[in-house]
Image (cartoon, rainbow, N blue to C red):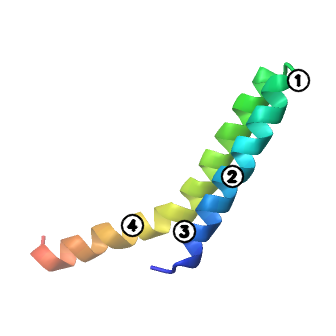
Amino acid sequence: MEISIIFKIALVGILVTMLNQILKQTGREEQAFLTSLAGLVLVLFWVIPYIAELFETIERLFAL
């Protein structure tokens, strides 16, 4: 696993948090929710291949 993925996730988290605070203070709760959702989907797209690789490794380890 690359260390850069952790930094990317942290950066997305910081940006989403800042955008959420700005949007909530301006009264745009719907856009703040969509921003959070978009950040979550982006991070999931990055993490899903690593999760699939983990399951494949576990499957090979136990020879299922």
Residue at the spot of label 2? 14
Q: Determine the residue positioned at 59% across, 77% down.
A: 4
Q: Earlier in the sequence, mark 3 or mark 1?
A: 3
Q: Residue at x 61, y 60 (%)?
A: 10
Quadrant for residue 34, please give it.
top right
Q: Is residue 41 above or below residue 60?
A: above
Which residue was labeled with disc 4? Answer: 52
Which amino acid lies under the numbered mark 4 shown in the image of this protein?
Ala
Q: Mark 3 sits on what residue? A: 6
Q: Is there CB contact under 8 Å for labels 2 and 1?
A: no
Q: Which amino acid type is shown beneath numbered disc 1?
A: Thr
Element under disc 3: helix
- Residue 33 x/y as whole percent: 70, 30
Dot 2 or dot 1, earlier in sequence: 2
Between disc 4 and disc 2, the foreground one is 2
The residue carrying mark 1 is 26
Nearest the viewer among 62 and 13 is: 13
45 to the left or right of 57: right
Is label 1 or label 4 in front? 1
Distance from disc 3 to disc 1, alpha carbons, whole Å, reads 31 Å
Decide: few, some or many residues near mark 1? Use Cα within 10 Å; few <14, some 14-19, many ≥20.
few
Quadrant in the picture for residue 30:
top right
Q: Residues within 10 Å of mark 3 (few under 14, many from 20)?
A: few
Q: Is residue 2 left or right of residue 51?
A: right
In this rendering, is residue 20 above or below 13? above
Callout 4 secondary element: helix
